[in-house]
Image (cartoon, rainbow, N blue to C red):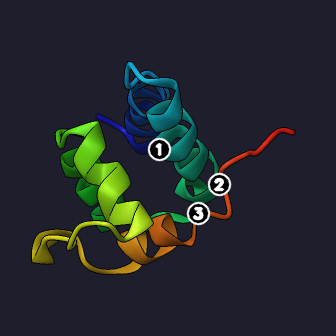
Amino acid sequence: MDREHRLKRLRFRAWHRGVKEADLLIGGFFDAHSAGWDDSEIDLFEILMEEQDVDIMAWAMGTAAVPARYEGTIMNALKTLNYVPISK
């Protein structure tokens, strides 16, 4: 599968998690960061998409410890939470 197809598939998965909060957090993160990912980061995000939304959100918000397999640039960027749109 080529890079463009992988990213298109991942974007759909990131924005269709089933819970609006997870869609905003994970989908917003994908839109903000995926263009700069290399193949290993795409691989890691594909694996991350298999995790439960509550776990991903807890890792991003710092309420649960991040498993060692996800530590690194993607998780550090996910933890910034500056990509989540907040409307008033």
Residue at left 30%, top 51%? 56
Which amino acid lies under the numbered mark 3 shown in the image of this protein? Leu
Horizontal relation, residue 14 to residue 65: left or right:
right
State the separation of the CA atoms marked 1 and 3: 10 Å
Q: Which residue is mark 2?
A: 32
Residue at left 57%, top 37%? 24
Which amino acid lies under the numbered mark 2 shown in the image of this protein? Ala
Horizontal relation, residue 65 to residue 21: left or right:
left
Looking at the picture, tell me which residue is in the foreground, 63 or 43.
Answer: 63
Q: Nearer the viewer, mark 1 or mark 3?
A: 3
Image quadrant holding the C terminus, namely top right
Give residue 67's mark. none
Give residue 81's mark. 3
Helix, strand or loop for disc 2:
helix
Q: Would you call the spot at circle 2 few (<14 residues within 10 Å), some (14-19), or many (20 or more)? A: some
Give yes or no for contact between labels 2 and 3 (Cβ–Cβ under 8 Å): no
